[in-house]
Each structure stands twice: as C-alpha cells, then as structure tokens.
Amino acid sequence: MNHVFQKCGIALLAAVAFAASAGTPQPRSLQDTIAAEDRAVFDSFNHCADPMQLQAHADHFAPDVEFYHDTGGVTWTRESMIENTRKHACGNYTRKLVDGTLRVHPIKDFGAISQGTHRFCRVDTGACEGEAEFTMVWRQHDGHWQVTRVLSYGHRPNPAAP
C-alpha cells in the first residue's frame, strides 16, 4: 500500500511541476527575439509619417548607428539616418520582410547579426517594386536591443513585381 501512495505522490508532484512550467513563459530563441525586434523596427518605419512612430523607429537604433546604403551613401548617426528616413521614406514607402529570408547569428557577449531580403512598397499604389538585402548588427544591453550597424545593399527591381 505504501508503494501506491509513493507512486501517487510522485505522479502528483510531476503534474504540479508540469502545470507550473506550462504557465511559466519560456525564453524565446534568439531567432524569435530578433524576428520580433525586426517586426517592431519596421512596423514603426511603415508608419513613420506619424512623428510618434518616427520617434519609436529612431529608438530602435543606437545614437552612433552607422547606416551603409549602396545607392544612398553612408550616415554616421541616428539623427542623420532618421532625417533621411523622414525625407525619403516616410509616407512614400513601406518595408516588407520576404518570408523565410531572415537569418540570425549570435555574437558572443554582445548580441546578434540579422540578415535577409526585404521589399519596399509604394504607399500610394501598394506596388512592391524594389528589393534589397540587409544586414543589421544588434546589441543587447540590460535586456534592451538596439541596432548599431545597418547595411542595405543589392537594391534592384522586385522580380515578383508585375
């Protein structure tokens, strides 16, 4: 009889432990974390005609961010990068990540590198005419992620555009 109580007790403890772990949020993978950060950066970019969204977009970048754009040149600060975004993109273009292209690589004791392909779509027509590759270096500090370097290159017509 004592063995029956032991088995029931073990089963009960296992059930309680399982129930407790089911309610505890599990840490996301680095891929999931950076994918969520990418969505947040570009959700604010896609709505940056609103000054509050432009500020939200800016907050994703380090003050000394370097942005390398193959057709637009280089900016060396968040302020100049955001000014270019405000002038050339906000209200004109939105960005879409091409499904299945986001790759994330850890950087020991620093953060991560993300790479992928994105398309740019005209706000007025919705046509996604342009496509490019990107690489972003992300720094994690005190649980907060910021982009420190951006490369946007290989700009070309979208092969899927009509």
Image (cartoon, rainbow, N blue to C red):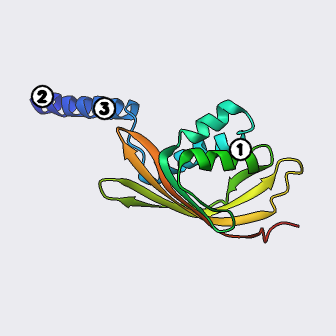
Expressed as whole percent of the image width and height from the top left, the position of residue 110 reads: 34, 53
Mark 1, residue position: 86
Q: Quadrant of the N terminus?
A: top left
Label 2: element kind: loop
Residue toward you, 151 or 77: 77
Q: Residue at x 17, y 31 (%)?
A: 4
Expressed as whole percent of the image width and height from the top left, the position of residue 59 reads: 54, 38
Query: Marks 1 and 2, how far apart in space?
Result: 76 Å
In the picture, the disc for residue 1 is 2
Residue toward you, 29 or 62: 62
Question: Does the image show residue 89?
Answer: no
Q: Residue at x 26, y 34 (%)?
A: 14
Residue toward you, 152 or 37: 152
Q: Crowding at label 2, few (<14), some or many (≥20) Cα neighbours within 10 Å?
A: few
Question: Does the image show residue 13?
Answer: yes
In the figure, 149 relative to 16: above or below?
below
Where residue 67 sits, quadrant-wise, is: bottom right
Marks 1 & 3, CB-CB < 8 Å contact: no
Classify residue 103 as left or right of residue 142.
right
What amino acid is at disc 2? Met
What amino acid is at disc 1? Arg
Label 3: element kind: helix
Classify residue 82 as left or right of residue 37.
right
Expressed as whole percent of the image width and height from the top left, the position of residue 159 reads: 78, 72
Q: Crowding at label 3, few (<14), some or many (≥20) Cα neighbours within 10 Å?
A: few
Query: Marks 2 and 3, how far apart in space?
Result: 21 Å
Marks 2 & 3, CB-CB < 8 Å contact: no
In the figure, 53 relative to 71: above or below?
above
Query: Marks 1 and 3, how far apart in space?
Result: 54 Å
Expressed as whole percent of the image width and height from the top left, the position of residue 43 reads: 65, 42
